[in-house]
Image (cartoon, grey):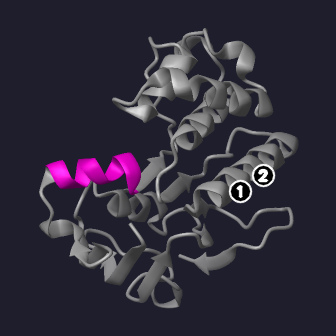
Amino acid sequence: MDNIILENISPKYFTPKDLEQSQIWKKNITFQKGKKFLIVAPSGSGKSTLATAILGTHFQYEGNIKYDQQIVKNLHLEKIVENRKDGVSLLFQDVRLIKDLTISENILLRVFNQDRKKFIPIMEEYAARLGVESLLSKKAENCSYGERQRSAIVRSLVNPTDFLIYDECFSHLDMENKKIAFSLINEVSQKSGSSVLFFELNEFPFEHDYQILHL
């Protein structure tokens, strides 16, 4: 997937605050593969609504979202799900690890039906970088929210899609861990050629070269 295109979209069942001032709602926006975006979205602006719409989990919006030239609303469910393997992924705000699986089992779900053995060194390297390597054999339900958040970031990167979307993925991390996680996401996405879309309540309090868009 080379582009995700938003064509004049707006939520169907609620009006976001500052709709007219938005740089995304009711605009034509193209997110190109390989480009980096920070979408700043205060509470009530429809941040999670937009993130999940791009993933294709709902169609409660006016206008169109396209994967390249394919209108997402017109795609069969099987095709939308297939796109999540390689095209677009979302780290949800509530993390969504399966609580009775270990951290490593949760992470390796991201490789689908590929040979898991070849992904184990990558998983271990990223987990070590984020300080969760010792948790790999621990069940997700026994980890703190911050530990699960860092583990979910590893999961998103072990087999990265063309477009990596993060909905407040640093919300339970301290500043040092935020910087480490941000650096790892940048490094892996650069290597894979992926685009990154961060949805955040505020701009990052550290230096970066992401294009900022206000929702």
Q: Quadrant of the N terminus?
A: bottom left
Q: Check disc 1 and report its element: helix, strand or loop.
A: helix
Query: Residue 138: x percent and y percent?
Result: 60, 9
Assess whether mark 1 and mark 2 are in contact (beta carbons under 8 angstroms): yes
The residue at 44%/34% (across/down) is 110
Instruction: Indicate whether residue 187 is drawn in magenta.
Output: no
Q: Label 1 amino acid?
A: Asn
Residue that carries the numbered disc 1 in the rendered image: 186
Horizontal arrangement in the rendering, residue 165 relative to residue 205 (left or right): left
Quadrant of the rendered image containing residue 8: bottom left
Question: Overall secondary structure of the magenta stretch?
Answer: helix
The residue at 82%/49% (across/down) is 179
Q: Which residues are magenta?
A: 78-87
Residue that carries the numbered disc 2 in the rendered image: 183
Q: Check disc 2 and report its element: helix, strand or loop.
A: helix
Query: Residue 134: x percent and y percent?
Result: 73, 14
Q: Label 2 amino acid?
A: Ser
The disc placed on residue 145 is none
